[in-house]
Amino acid sequence: MKSETKVCQNCKNDFTIEPDDFLFYEKIKVPPPTFCPECRLQRKMAWRNERSFYNNTCSLCDKNIISIYNKNSPFLVYCNDCWWGDNWDVMSYGKEYNFLEFFLKQFNELILAVPRVSLFQKGNIDSPYTNHADHNKNCYLCFNNGFIEDSMYSKWGVKSNYMYDSYSILDSSFIYESMDLTHCNNCIYAINSKDCFNSSFIYNCSGCNNCFLSTNLRNKKYVFKNKQYSKQEYNDLINKIKLTKFSIINNIINDFKGDILKNIIRKYASITRSINSTGDIIFGSKNSKKCFHLIDTENCSYCVDNSSIKDSYDTYESAFNCELQYDSHACNRLSNGKWCNISYDCHHLTYCDNCHSCSNCFACIGLRSKQYCILNRQYTKEQYEELVPKIIQHMNDMPYIDSKGRVYKYGEFFPSELSPFCYNETIAQEYFPLTKEEAIKQGYKWKDKEERSYQIDIKNEDIPDDINDIDESIVNKVIECSHKGTCNQQCTEAFKIIPEEYQFYKRMNLPIPRLCPNCRHYERLSQRNPLKLWHRTCMHEGCTNEFETSYAPERSEIVYCEKCYQQEVY
């Protein structure tokens, strides 16, 4: 079996299907994809609204709720209690398959009919403003977190507490404006570090404490700008820096992002305790290629933001012992699942959306503890096994064609134009940002900015520079975001400081932020490398080692292979 070059029917660029890819497709009995890996990921992301919240009303109990669907959406939206309750019958929406109609048209009719759950939450306590969140306690505007407490404005936190404005934090506490940390405590503006505490503005440090504006350290303490000091000398230097002032921190951030991070040596990828794997931010994985942000995976390809999965391709945000999963989004504990969306504890699902504890279902929505169903209609095992191959053949004989002429035969994830969300409400806008004009041209829906009638209490320029000059009177005041809605970052134009947040800033001696939570989130994302790889050669003089890296060739960073990096840093 040889590799083949295909033309993506979405972006029209060439992409390669490798022999190992063909073997996987043959193993799970699916046709090769017609979209390139990036377009496949973008298509799935366009089905995930993670952080766009709206006030809505439960269509069953009439309770006022927070929802990822606005009041003008065409869906019935239920609160979590009602959706998971027994006062409605999801099977009542079932329909017989019509071989005279497009498969995806029938599936879309089911999407529009079956009630949607307002938010994806499980086991949360006092955390109503969270989504894709399990067992969160006292959390606010946190997304895709598990077992975190007393945290705000953060994503991908696990077993952590007092985590503010951070991304990808594991087993840590008192963390602010940081990314990719493990086992850290009392750290601010820390990136890609582990086992560190009482440190600020550090990058790629391990086993360090009381370090400041430093990079690539191992088991160090009392280091300032990568220079060793005594404890007293270090404390004297730190005490001269007024981190309570926004202007001071802002200058340090510019210094940190500028001369310091641009001129340091970087390893081609952050791949730790992993074997035969390519991509970036990979831990404890084996035989995984072209993947990003993985933990404990095996035999996976083109996967992003996954944990504990194996033998899977093209999964996004799936976790907890998945296997043989293909081209699916946010499916936990799913095995043998193809083109599925947000489905848990299932096996042998195909084209299913928000199904739980189900098996052997095809094109179903919202089912729980069901098997042998098609379009939410019950069949016997024999009827199901006879009908499914006929539907697959029908999908190939009569494929759905979207508004831009893209052909959807059996083997493609749901078209973006059928997503319940507009493009700029979804994660796709974060990783593949588009303007309104670009989105519409490419066939995506777009949500126009709502007219906001905020009465601004505090202009951005009037926020006191020093946290010591701020008292509790600032709590719940409407503060102007410095972007004022002029950016492409889902800016809310204004924000509030809530009581718990105020106490955190006071405790950590940190100034009040100047951007709204959405803009702060986008600013953090801009510091992460793209979900894309380039073939490059080590930049160490005399080294000819080659590798795949998420650092584009035109970037200014100094990128080394692992061997040369270890010789310089460890």
Image (cartoon, grey):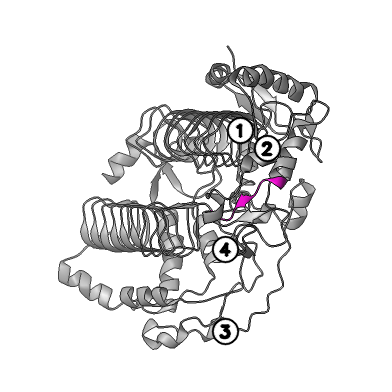
User: Could you tell me how far apart the alpha carbons at marks 4 and 2 are, in whole angstroms?
Assistant: 26 Å
Mark 2 or mark 3, whichever is nearer to me = 2
Relative side of 445 to 459, left or right: right
Residue 370, by quadrant, is top right
**Residue 422 image point, x, y percent:** 70, 53
Q: Secondary structure at mark 4?
A: strand
Relative side of 10 to 141, left or right: right
Relative side of 244 to 65, left or right: left
User: Could you tell me how far apart the alpha carbons at marks 4 and 1 are, in whole angstroms?
Assistant: 28 Å
- Image position of 102 with respect to 263: above or below: above
Sequence-first tag of 4 and 2: 4
> According to the image, label 1 marks what residue?
339
> According to the image, label 4 marks what residue?
66
> According to the image, label 3 marks what residue?
459
Quadrant for the C terminus, please. top left
**Three-letter amino acid code at the position of disc 3:** Lys
Sequence-first tag of 3 and 4: 4
Q: Is residue 118 magenta?
A: yes
**Three-letter amino acid code at the position of disc 1:** Trp
**Three-letter amino acid code at the position of disc 4:** Ile
Residue situated in front as seen by the camera: 284 or 130: 130
